[in-house]
Amino acid sequence: MNQALVTLEIQQGIAMVGLNRVDKYNALSFEMFTSIKKTIKKISQRRDVNAVVLFGHGDNFCSGLDVKSVMSSASQAVKLLFKWLPGNANLAQQVSIGWRRLPVPVICAIDGICYGGGMQIALGCDFRIASPNSRLSIMEAKWGLVPDMAGLVGLRELVGKDQAMLMTMTAEIYSGDEAKALGLVTLVDDKPLEAAQQLATKLIQTSPDANAAIKHSINRNWTTSIRRLLSRESRFQIGLLAGKNRVVAAKRQGKHPDKAYLSRQSWW
């Protein structure tokens, strides 16, 4: 039986997603791209998932694109980069921006190597928790390429323009502590996977609808006009007040939050 390239386990509202190509440091083959895309779609269809923890099996998160594997077939390369319209996301971009589009918080646990495509995927997550000795790099320029997996969408929100250009042009490798100082990661912890699970558990104690609305509002309005921000805030708040959101939130702050579990709604 073939080993799953991406594992998915759902427990008490938390989806644990693991990149699972350990012998290749979880490098991205074409099959792995399609597996990540399918996993994101599967989670999007589950109303009982209220948080995601993304990690790498073994001692590394992801070493980036497996160029030899992907380029072994011209059709694979075409399928990876093809898109109907320039503004759409192709397969290579969907494995990063797809996490942003999920209506639940997504936490990336980074240990060991997180290079190139792996960093692009991590930048698509809402939070990144790295070990102090992990190694992170936007490495595409080293191979004469530009970052093209939608990671720049997240990068531009995390660091200044000059820092973004410095990171991408130099392909510098940063430790977890250095990445935290630059704003690339949210937290540094000796046990990033455990810390990510703890954060996920904390996040699902509040309303899943409110978390979805907050994520959507911040992502869509981070650089938009004030008028559009005010409009979207009001629309979401009306939807939350009209639903079961307040009851769920109140119960989850009570003595038995585990008994107050309720799936997300889909009104947004």
Image (cartoon, rainbow, N blue to C red):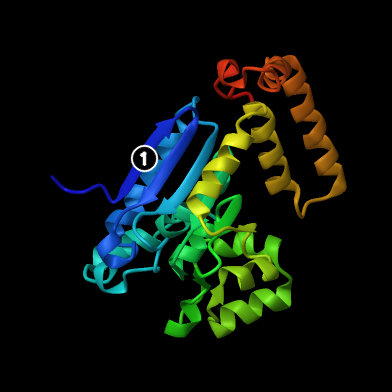
**Relative to residue 227, is residue 211 drawn left or right?**
left
Dividing the picture into quadrants, the one containing residue 56 is: bottom left
- Front position in the image: 241 or 268: 241
**Relative to residue 151, is residue 113 drawn left or right?**
left
Q: Where is residue 207 in the image (x, y as percent from the top left)?
A: 66, 26
Q: Where is residue 73 in the image (x, y as percent from the top left)?
A: 22, 67
Q: Position of residue 155 (x, y in %)?
A: 63, 64
Which quarter of the rendered picture does the C terminus lie within?
top right
Residue drawn 37% across the image and 36% down it: 9
Dividing the picture into quadrants, the one containing residue 10 is: top left
- Front position in the image: 12 or 189: 189
Can see residue 268?
A: no
Q: Residue furthest left?
A: 1
Can see residue 6?
A: yes
Q: Is residue 116 above or below residue 105?
A: below
Which quarter of the rendered picture does the N terminus lie within?
top left
Which amino acid, by three-letter code, is at mark 1?
Leu
Residue drawn 26% across the image and 74% down it: 68
Q: Mark 1 points at which residue?
A: 8
User: Crowdedness of circle 1 by 10 Å Cα count: few (<14), some, many (20+)?
Assistant: some
- Front position in the image: 73 or 63: 63
Q: Position of residue 143 (x, y in %)?
A: 42, 83
- Tell me the SS state at disc 1: strand
Q: Is residue 156 above or below residue 97?
A: below
Dividing the picture into quadrants, the one containing residue 166 is: bottom right
